Amino acid sequence: MVDGRRRPLKIGFGLPDSEDARTGTTASWREIAAVALRAEAAGFDSVWVQDHLLFRLADGKTEGVWESFSMLSALAAITSRVEVGTLVTCTSFRNPALTAKIADTIDEISGGRVILGLGAGWHEPEYRAFGYPFDHRVSRFEEALQIIHGLLHDGKVDFEGRYYQARDCALHPRGPRKHGPPIMMGTTGERMLGLTARYADSWNVYFSRTGNTPEGMLPLLERVDAACEAAGRDPATLARSATVYVDFTGSAGSASSVNPTGVPPISGEPEQIADALRRYADLGVSHVQVYTEPLNIEGVERFVPVLEALDRG
């Protein structure tokens, strides 16, 4: 039950923060803000932005993406109830100590509603285009994570690594939460899952890794449990979340930066979609982030009957 409702898990809405290569259009800030505010009013629990710099599709088309922390800061200021989060911040794109500083500042703006999604990144073209090294991504991530976690959790860190340094670094002033915003890690790799078990508050998986089905999560959930046990952590203390792709238009999983592999969407009547989400909850998933087709206010409105069905239990 979520917040006294019969809703079995939190439902987030993924915002239209990237260019649609199919139409050549990009949502403006005013349009994104309108979607976020409507999602909040409609009863969604959270709103989410991607962290990409550009995205190149298999057909050679390029999709641009608005910078995530700029968008997140603005969303924190205009909303009042929903959590605001990143799916997920690529630690390669920013100095890790500054990332912690930014996240804690946005948490202050939001009044303690930020979820800091973190990942090692994977889309090589954007690394090359913006001049970031693509080598040793997990090793770089491990160092960045130690700095980010140390600063957010303890307010200070003294770290000297191969790739990053933060000597006698302190985080002042602090945001509204003593240990900063919770860290959510999006990953399926063995080494990254080990880091998730050690440092994260929650784990996330994107629907392209699950086939967009609850059943597709089963082997991944087993690996998450195993990583926790190997780290000496009770698996029950690590929250689980997943993105899902829901289509109201009959597009059958068109490829885009949101759905690069073109996986089949969840579709059907509101009760059918709600039932699919209940199956995620049955697996222990406590939060899903929904990307809809269409990805705009209409997508929010079309999803409202699904929320109502979930709230009925």
Image (tube, rainbow, N blue to C red):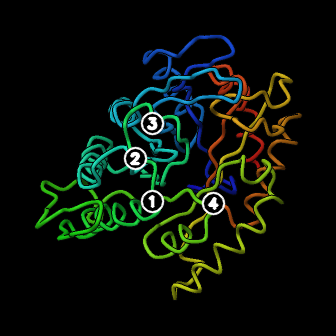
Q: Earlier in the sequence, mark 3 or mark 4?
A: 3
User: Closer to the camera, 301 or 245?
Assistant: 245
Amino acid type of the residue tagged 4 in the rendering: Ser
Is label 3 in contact with label 1 (beta carbons under 8 Å)? no
Residue at 43% in and 18% down: 29
- Image height check: is 125 above or below 243? above
What's the distance in space between the residues labelled 3 and 4, CA to CA?
36 Å
Is label 4 in contact with label 1 (beta carbons under 8 Å)? no
The residue that disc 1 covers is 136
What's the distance in space between the residues labelled 3 and 1, CA to CA?
14 Å
Say what secondary structure mark 1 lies in: loop
The residue that disc 3 covers is 128
Q: In front: mark 2 or mark 4? A: 2
What's the distance in space between the residues labelled 4 and 1, CA to CA?
32 Å
Q: In front: mark 4 or mark 1? A: 1
Amino acid type of the residue tagged 3 in the rendering: Arg
